[in-house]
Amino acid sequence: MVDTARVANIIDTYRRMGFTTALDDFGAGHAGLNLLARFQTDVIKLDMELIRGIDTSMPRRMIVEGLVRMFERMDIMVVAEGVETLGEYETLRNMGIRYIQGYLLARPGFKVLPIYDVPQSVGTRQIA
């Protein structure tokens, strides 16, 4: 992003018009803390590379937990991208992340609505 001042102006304009804005792929090299320091959107979508294997990676869990707490204080909604396993899903839900997207829930489609299926954990406890 070359002209962050222009982007900040666009975000402010959209917000005044009643639009919701989002920063996609947060945690990827091009969308990180420096951009967040310059402007805040209504929604942050955590990059799938940060989410991948979060259930088995303490460093990833610690990073995402810290980000979630920071975003809560900034009143920014969090979306986790690229959730593919039940373990990732459960870990993110236990962290308080409400909005999740990924192949675990539905595959992308063209001109169709995906069939949504809430994952079931092992046993009878339903995750919802």
Image (cartoon, rainbow, N blue to C red):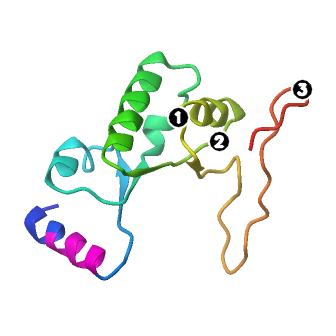
Front residue of 122 and 41: 41
Instruction: From the viewer's perspective, tell me whether residue 113 is left or right of residue 99.
Output: right
Q: Amino acid at mark 3?
A: Gly
Tally of marks: 3
Residue 71 on image: x %, y %? 35, 43
Residue designated by label 2: 84
- The stretch in magenta equals 9-16
Type of amino acid under label 1: Arg
Q: Please give left or right for residue 78 compared with residue 108 in the image.
A: left
Circle 2: is it few (<14), some (14-19), or many (20+) Cα within 10 Å?
some
Name the residue nearer the viewer: 116 or 9: 9
Q: Which residue is mark 3?
A: 123
Outermost residue on the right side: it is 124
Image quadrant in which the C terminus is located: top right
Q: Are marks 1 and 2 in contact (CB under 8 Å)?
A: yes
On residue 52, the disc is 1
